[in-house]
Image (spheres, rainbow, N blue to C red):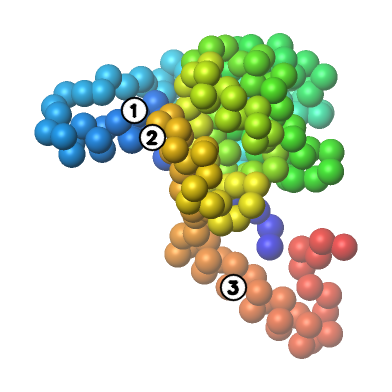
């Protein structure tokens, strides 16, 4: 199934939810309520932050469309930083992957939006995380394998990385005993970014449409190979 349409919109909304949850310190807010707190913790606004979309596909486009009205500075990081991409995504700047660290040095929130391939596995490694400014955030709604597990745990444990919002993992489901889930600066969800009524309805419609195409002797749409 293509990632465009309802699925991309659902995933983009979830990425935005994770960003806001990290910046407003959702785990601390919940704990504060349960201990009778009021007016704490102090959060941060998304407005004024710099968000980097690493990979400029349909999910990144849907996310860019939602971020632009919120007063963020948008950066793109892609193999082919064409001017038309800057215009289509409304980016403030677009960098080639060869300029990765220069782009990441300006980034407050990093969102990997690339497919998981042999080339992109471990794309967000220790070097990439170290290139981010201290106090930056990572949001991953793509695939767990895009991020180095050990590098992420180290960056979160040292608090160099302020937090991570994760919907995808290296093995799924992630073990409830995984040390990553015990870190106070992690917001974790169970791979539900694309799990919405609208997304599933679109997927069902596409599957039914391909069945009808095959029945008529026509090739299915969106073939992977």
Instruction: Check contact, mark 3 vs mark 2: CB within 8 A.
Output: no
Sequence-first tag of 3 and 2: 2
Residue receiving disc 2: 21
> x, y percentage for residue 25?
34, 29
Q: Residue furthest right?
A: 225
Q: Nearer the viewer, residue 149 or 43?
A: 149
Q: CA distance from mark 3 to mark 2?
A: 32 Å
**Horizontal side, residue 3 vs residue 38: left or right:** right
View extreme (bottom): residue = 215
Q: Nearer the viewer, residue 34 or 16?
A: 34
Q: Are marks 3 and 1 in contact (CB under 8 Å)?
A: no
Compared with 71, 139 (above or below) is below
Q: Is residue 128 left or right of residue 37?
A: right
| Badge 2 element | helix
Q: Are marks 1 and 2 in contact (CB under 8 Å)?
A: yes
Q: Residues within 10 Å of mark 1 (few under 14, many from 20)?
A: some
- Relative horizontal placement of residue 215, taking residue 159 as reference (left or right): right
Give the quarter of the image for residue 111. top right
Q: Residues within 10 Å of mark 2 (few under 14, many from 20)?
A: many
Closer-to-camera residue (201/30): 30
For disc 1, the marked residue is 24
Residue 124: x %, y % from top left: 69, 29
Residue 187: x percent and y percent?
44, 38
Let me know if residue 114 appears in the view: yes
User: Which numbered tag is attached to residue 205?
Assistant: 3
Q: Is residue 18 above or below residue 152?
A: below
């Amino acid at each position: 199934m293509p990632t465009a349409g309802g699925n991309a919109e659902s995933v983009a909304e979830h990425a935005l939810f994770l960003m806001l949850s990290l910046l407003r310190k959702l785990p601390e807010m919940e704990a504060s309520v349960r201990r009778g707190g009021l007016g704490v913790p102090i959060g941060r606004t998304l407005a004024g932050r710099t968000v980097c979309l690493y990979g400029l596909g349909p999910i990144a486009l849907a996310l860019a469309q939602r971020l632009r009205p919120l007063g963020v500075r948008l950066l793109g990081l892609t193999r082919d930083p064409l001017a038309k991409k800057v215009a289509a995504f409304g980016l403030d700047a677009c960098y080639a992957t060869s300029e990765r660290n220069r782009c990441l040095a300006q980034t407050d929130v990093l969102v990997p939006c690339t497919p998981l391939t042999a080339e992109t596995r471990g794309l967000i490694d220790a070097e990439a995380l170290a290139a981010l400014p201290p106090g930056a955030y990572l949001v991953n709604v793509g695939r767990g394998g895009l991020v180095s597990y050990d590098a992420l745990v180290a960056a979160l444990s040292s608090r160099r990385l302020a937090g991570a919002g994760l919907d995808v993992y290296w093995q799924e489901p992630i073990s409830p005993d995984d040390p990553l889930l015990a870190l106070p600066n992690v917001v974790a969800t169970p791979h539900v970014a694309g799990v919405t009524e609208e997304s599933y309805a679109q997927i069902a419609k596409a599957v039914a449409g391909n069945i009808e195409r095959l029945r008529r002797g026509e090739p299915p749409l969106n073939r992977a190979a």
